[in-house]
Amino acid sequence: MKNAKIQAVKEFISQYAGIMVDMTIRDSKSFTFHFDGENNNAMIKIAKYFISGNAKVEYLYDSEVDSTMIFVDVA
C-alpha cells in the first residue's frame, strides 16, 4: 500500500472508531490496527466493521503495554 492510501485507511478507521488508531501491515491481506489503552467500544466497532466484510478478526488488550490490537486477515 502506498503511504497516502495507508494514511487514508488510518484516518477512516480512526474516525469510524472514534479514537486515534494506528495500522501495521503484516502482508498484502493482513493488517493490525492498534491504539493506546483499553477501549472495548472502539475495539468491537472496528472488529464488526471487518467481520461484516468476511474478514477473519482477532483482538486483544495487553495490559503490560496498555495497548489494544485488532488483527485482520482479509479473505
Image (cartoon, grey):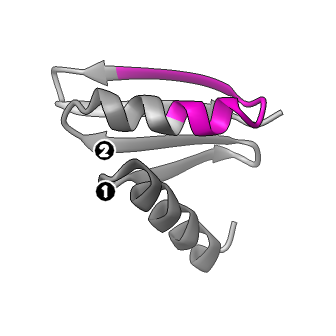
Label annotation for residue 49: none
What's the CA distance linking mark 2 and mark 1? 7 Å
User: Left or right: where does residue 23 sit relative to residue 55?
Assistant: left
Residue at the right extreme, as displayed: 75
User: Left or right: where does residue 56 sit relative to residue 54?
Assistant: left
Q: Depth check: give the residue in front, 41 or 7.
A: 41
Q: Secondary structure at mark 2?
A: strand
Image quadrant in which you'd find residue 44 = top left
User: Residue at label 2?
Assistant: 35
The residue stretch that appears in magenta: 47-60
Q: Depth check: give the residue in front, 27 or 46.
A: 46
Q: Residue at x 40, y 57 (%)?
A: 14
Does residue 59 show up magenta in the picture? yes
Q: In the image, what residue type sits under mark 1?
A: Met
User: Residue at label 1?
Assistant: 20
Q: Residue at x 30, y 52 (%)?
A: 19
Q: In the image, what residue type sits under mark 2?
A: Phe
Q: Depth check: give the residue in front, 27 or 23.
A: 23
Depicted 24 relative to depicted 3: above or below: above
Percent from the top left, x then y, of residue 61? 30, 22
